[in-house]
Each structure stands twice: as structure tokens, then as C-alpha cells.
Image: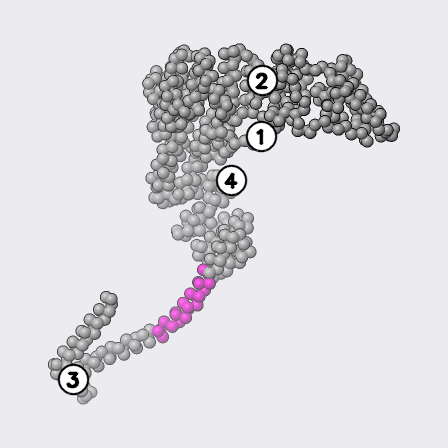
Amino acid sequence: MIKTLIFFAVLLAIAFGGAWLADRPGEIIINWPWLDMGFEVSLLMGFLLIVAAMGVAVVLWIVIRGIWNSPRSVTGFFSSRRRDKGYKALSTGMIAVGVGDLALARKQAAKARKLLGQEPMTLMLEAQTAQLAGEPTKARQSFEAMLDTDETRALGRRGLYIEAQRRGDMEEAMQMAKAATDESKKTPGWAGTALFDMQTASRDWQGALVTLSQNHANKHLSKDAFRRQRAVILTAQAMELDGQENADASIRALLGEACKLAPGLVPAVVMHADLLNDAKDYRKASKLVEAAWRIEPHPELAHAYAYIKDGDTALDRLKRIRVLFGLMPDHIESKLAMARAFIDAREWAEARSLLEPMAEAHLTPRICMLMAELEEGDKNDFGLVRQWLARAVGAHRDPAWTADGQVSDVWQPISPVTGKIDAYEWKVPVREVAQVDQPMLDSRDLTDEDRSEGDMVLLPAEASGAEDKAKGFVVAEDDIEEIHPEVADERPEEIAPEAAKDVPAVPADKPETERKDQPSAEAVASAAKAAEDSKPQKAADVEDVPVAPAKDKASARIEIEKPKEVEFPMPFPPDDPGPKKDEAARKADKRFKLF
């Protein structure tokens, strides 16, 4: 719209100018005395001749300039086509590198080099093609060539850093990262992060603090991440100074700043609380632990809080733990800390009221150990103590300090695998899920001497009923006699010959020690004789039957190989638990099941 108005304004000005010239008659006279020539025109015609002369001059200037620049124009046309082809080859080569087409990438890289020469992206394509082909020497040469140009120097350092990391040359990698950070005022993100990671992995805490501040100033990490990482580095410095002479003041200053930056950093809080305890500043130590407990309860915090004052009695510690319990009453660590204090104070009923619901909901080794200690202190029942210790083996795992799959008893500032800072987390370690129906301990693997010690023996699930199969293992019957002799009298000592048909067949390939719950020698011999009488057999089909010497009817066992043509029928399916036991034996089995 504006351009249209301008166009009409120009036309209007021309019209007014022409009308003005037409209304003012006049003549233009030009004389050339030396040529004895002259001509005379009107004012309007003279103006039109001047305009025409200017137009002719412009046209002549364009023609002459075009003729003069024609060689350059022809050259530019062909170079433009060449450049377009080069950039097309460069684009195709980058796509080929992305999809992993090595042959096409090499072809397009050579074509781009021929058409474009030392273009930055040509060097990048060659370097990536060499990396794809597994040729680190060529890739390194391409990245080194980028260092000669200002616009590609940062890219070359980045490439050399990656190649150094692949070779494991951490010294060169650190040099490239440090050069990238020192060259410009604003540190590149990759250089600051890489330099910080290498400094922390090598435990250069002072240099790591400087790099961390630069990264935070350049906005490469958030404020919360900066505070957390700085607190971890200060704690690491305090841990290194721990044990040195005259270092308490420095350690206290480092830990004080670390606790302000990250109040939930458990190692820093525990160390600082210990120092404050030594300085008899109990109130400040208590507030420090309470603040960390509100963020995330931890057993080390509970222990530090319970033993803030040296020389306190168990009742004093119980009173103090009640305060900590009130801050997070629903957390499992609060309940475990409270149960620990109850046991130390010999408050058995209160400890049991806390531990038994947790044992039913989610059993862990810590709960099992506390329950074992409770049973020993409250009832002095070592049988129940052994049960809880046995259950601890198959219970869910407790949380632990874990970093990159590695479990540690104590917190460390960096990962032992990758060297990454603040990698340890308080969580349940990853492990293989064990099969529930696998036995933990088989009573048939124990000797008579082991049995005489009276320890609990666990049997596989298939040796018990359907209910026991779902839970994994039960207490062996041979141990019931040792713990409760009154039950032993109710078990049959031998099996009558006529009852042999109610007993499952005895596998012939099991050793004698694995068949303590199988029928006696007389029962098996009677069954074999009945089978021989009922069906004639060839002499070659039946081999000699070795008979083991029997001391008494209860312990007599024989080694027998089943005849080829004789099959003993199974009186009940394999999954059936077998004949029901009498009431006393059933109650004894039910009482001594571990799960």
C-alpha cells in the first residue's frame, strides 16, 4: 500500500512538473562559435532531450560494464555450480555417516574434498568417516588440521578430546579440555564438564572447586546441582584431612559449609555431629542431625543422634530417640531406630510391637537380626534365635551405599568404577532374583556329627507338602526329635510289609544317606518278592540284588536295581503330599516351619 502511494505521488509530481513547464514558454539556445553551429529548442523539449540523454548514458554504462565483467561472470557461474555440487556431496556424506554407510561416506568425503577444498565441514566429514571406519590416525589428522583455523579450532579440540578418551590417554584429554576453557571467556559446556569430571576422578579437589564455580557462572549447571557437588567436594576434603594433626578447625569449617549447602548429605552431617560432640556442643549437633533426618532418615543419622553425649545410659538414648522418632514416625528407619533403642533399654514388649508388623510386611536381614536379639534377650530361646538367623539369609536385602553396581559399607565421594562424583546412593542393591523353590541347605548333605550339634536343617520344598512348596523350605523331621523329644515317640519306626504298596518306589541310583525317609529293607524285599512271584522273569533280566548290612529294622537299607520288566505302581500322584500324619506330628511340623 505504501509503495502504491509513493508511485502515484511520483506520477503526480511528474504531471505537475510537465504542466508547469508547459505554462512557461521559453527557448533554449546553444551556440558553438568555434564550430559556427547552434540550435534552438523550447524549454519543454530541452528538458525531454536531457532526460533521454541520461537514459542513453545509463544503458551504455550497463553494456560496457557487462562486457568488462563478462570473464568474471563466466568464472563465477562455473565456481558456483562447483560449490553447489560440493555442498550437496557434503550433505550426502553427513547423512551416510549418520546411517553407518561407510562406502558412501568415503565417496562423498572425497568428492567434497575435491570440490570444496579445506572447508571446515569437509574436514569434519573426513574425521567422522575415519572414526566410522575405525581409523583413529586419520581422524586425529583431520582434527589437528582444524586447529589451524580460528573458526574450527574449538571443533578440533573437541574431536581430539574424544579421540584421547577412546585411547585412554587422560593426560591429553585433560590438556584439550583445559585449553578449551582457557581460550575463551565463556567456557564451552563440554569442556567445563569434562575438566570437572577428570579433576574429581583424580581427586584434585581444589581444581575441581574452581572449575565448578566457572561452570556455575557460565550457567552449565543448576544452582541445586552446584550446591550439592560443592558440598560433596568439601566433605571429601574433610575426609582426607581427618586423622591429621591440628586439622580439626579446618575440618569443622569444611563440614560446616557442606552442611549449609546440602543439609541432607549424610556423611557430612555425621562427621560434623561427631566433631560437635567432641566439642560438647550437643545442642547444635542435635539440630544438625534433626534437619538431615527430616530430609531423609538414615541409620547412620540415628546412631549419631543416639550417641551424641558420651556416657549416656540406654534409657537416656531411648529418650533421645523418641524425639527423633516423632519427626518421621511412619518411616521404617524411625521404627528400626526406635526398636534398637527399646532392645538396648530391655523394653522387650515395646520392641516386639514394632518389629513383628515389619517382619510380616517386609522382612529384611536387619529386622531378622533385631528379632534374633530380641528373642535371646527376652525369652533366651536359642531355637528361635537360629530360626531368625536362618531367615535372614533369604530375606529381602537392606539398603546400602551403592554406586554403579558396587556396594560399599561406607560412603565415598566418587564412584570406584567410573570416577563420577556423588555416585553413591542409599538404596537396595540390584541382585539376581533367586528361585523360591531352591533349597538353602539340605539335611542330607550333613554328616551325623553335624546333626549332633542340634542346628536347624532346611529341606527342599519338594520334600514337604504343597503349602511348604510355596514357602521354600521347612525344618527337617530329624531335628524335631532333638528339639522336642515328645514328638519322636509318635513317628513309626518301621513299615509293615503289607504297607509297602502305600510307599513310593525307591530310586535305585540314590546313595544310602539320601533315603532316610524310605521304607525298610523287609518292606522292599517283600514287594520285590511279590512282583517276582506274580510274573515270571528271565534270568538275564534280573541282576543280583545287593543288600546292605542292617544294624536294626529302622536303619536297614538295601541297594536294589529295578527289574526291566517289573514296574512298581505309584500309589498317589507325585505332587500329592502323601498320607496324612497324625495330629501330633502335623502340629510339630507346622510349629517349626521357617516360612
Q: Is residue 372 among the parts visible in the rendering?
A: yes
Label 4 Cα neighbours within 10 Å, binned few <14 / some 14-19 / many ≥20? few
Relative side of 98 to 472, left or right: left
Magenta region, residue range: 66-87
Are the residues flagged by discs 3 and 2 in contact, CB closer than 8 Å? no
Quadrant location of residue 184?
top left
Pick the front one: 577 or 90: 577
Amino acid type, callout 4: Gly
Residue 230: mark in rendering: none
Chain-order first, disc 2 or disc 1: 1
Measure the C-alpha gap from mark 2 to mark 4.
Answer: 61 Å
What element does badge 1 sit on? Answer: loop
Amino acid type, callout 3: Ser
Nearer the observer, disc 4 or disc 1?
1
Nearer the observer, disc 3 or disc 1?
1
Name the residue tied to disc 2. Answer: 591
Nearer the observer, disc 2 or disc 1?
2
Query: Is 463 above or below relative to 187?
Result: above
Residue 42: mark in rendering: 3
Residue 434: mark in rendering: 1
Amino acid type, callout 1: Ala
Measure the C-alpha gap from mark 4 to mark 1.
Answer: 38 Å
